Image (spheres, coloured by chain):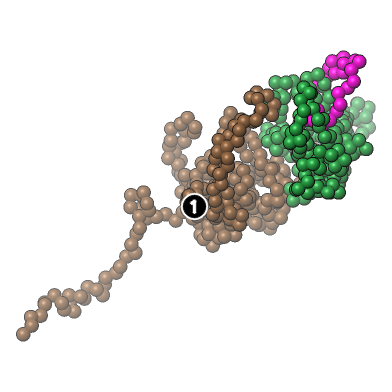
Chain colours: A brown, B green
Amino acid sequence: MAKTNKFLTMSFLSFLSSATVEEAVVPAKGSNGGPRKQVNPNPAILAIRVWKDGSVYPSQAAVDKFQLEYGKGTYETIPAVAAVGVEGQEGYKAAKPATRKFVPNENAIGNGFDVIDSQNWAQFKAEGRLLFLGLVPKSLPKVDLFGTTRFDAEGNPLLSVLNQGSTTFGQAVLLEAIEEIYGIKFQRNAKDATEDNKAIEAQEGVEFVDMLIAEELEGVNITEAFSKPISFFPKKVTRGADKGKDDYERRENIKVYGFVPLALTQDLSPVENLAETLTQEA
Amino acid sequence: MNGIQVGINNNVFLKNVVSDDKLWLTLTFEQEQKIAYSPFEAIGAENEAIEKPISSMDVKIFNLKVPKATDMKGNTRTTAQIEEMVTRDITKLKATLLHFLKGYLTKDQIKFDVYRATGITADNYGPSIRQQNILDQITKNLHQDFITMVTSFLTTKQLFRLLLIRQSKDKHFATLRDNYLDENPIWESMEVPEEATKVKFTKYEIDNGLNDPTPTSKSSADKPGEAAPEVTAASVFGG
């Protein structure tokens, strides 16, 4: 007569009726095992999430509508160029070594954004102040957001624009602009001054802000009203002896959008008078 | 008020453009300045001080010319050298006109038909541009296209910052810089605030006194008894 294993009975398995299975949590790379944070805004809205460290992430809807994704390309070799003329005399051109230049495929150039503080935009005439975005091809110089990334040897972008999270412009300009214009405080830890950066005081605040990319605000069609054939978008010199000096880029046929905290548009109050106060000379 | 002169001139508008039978293109610039009313005028005036141009200047761009067979040292120029010089002169003239047009138009609105009525093709380009009559037609085409594109803006009084350089250390007449205009512009909308302007003299121009408007005496500008040097695109723009 076979022996019956006393453990293999229904009473032993009765615990199954109350058992559950939890979702496995995949720790982010380089983290200490915590859950991966949602870096992008709601994929369905046209927005950019600006984090307290200055990193910026677009929504999927923004990537699709504005063609923000990086495209494939190829590397071209630019041959060396001999010097022309005599150094110190007019017309002299120094020799240039051979270089490699990344050339995006014609149908894969994609777009980025210029960020425009209306206070510094001389063509904009109004009492109020807000941020605008200009939708510009990535191929143009001095594109503020989503302008460049690195590519592998085959010309494929190493990162998607959704995950890139560049902090350069955010740290240099955007965090301070959002705080100053919209009165939002980002959480900050104290930092000592460095050679390149001033000291930072600790402050309480938010981890991130979702910034809406708005074609219309308070009945004003921003894109129709403020997109001109020729625009001079304010910039700063970022390198060399003139670093920090006022500069500009001439742009042609650029569509302009409002760039405001999503929370503000839902509350409406900070922009209630937008239709009354915003005008622009033709 | 000194008016338009060698230097950086603000609030300038292009008043007129004329191409004459010598194929010299004359650009007439005027400058808006406020004038103050006398006490009598101020009391009786209906409005505040009006703006009216108090300065006008004609700047000439000379016609394209085939360079001489020998240079100033008597060396014979090769066919390739002559073609390179003419190509450079055409490029400079077109770039200058393009630079002014970009003050008013976007790139897709600017169209030049340089080879119109010349018969020039890729195969006969070199020999063609060594013929003066062909160069004259190219000059006419560039002038006509420029005038066509700019004429409607001559009445709009759009204001610009205009940089004029001195012709040379010895000659105080104002002329236009013709090199690297994208990096070193000479014509910039006044919508750009002064703090951000890209209009400035180059180091070479400053070192060589080309930013100095001080008039020179006639004796140093023109040596008596000597014929005035032939004015060609090459002599004005270098070559």
Residue with the most extreme bottom position: A1
Query: Residue at (58%, 40%) from the top-left corner?
Result: A79
Q: Which residue is mark 1?
A: A154
Compare residues B88 and A31 and report the one nearer the observer.
B88
Where does the N terminus of chain A fall, quadrant-wise?
Answer: bottom left
Residue with the most extreme left position: A1
Q: Quadrant of residue A24?
A: bottom left
Q: Is residue A158 above or below residue B136?
A: below
State left or right for residue B214 relative to residue A26: right
Residue B213 point in image, percent of width and height: 80, 22
Query: Residue at (15%, 77%) from the top-left corner?
Result: A8
Q: Which residues are magenta?
A: B212-237
Overall secondary structure of the magenta section: loop
Q: Quadrant of residue A188?
A: top left
Query: Residue at (61%, 48%) from the top-left corner?
Result: A139
Q: Is residue A15 magenta?
A: no
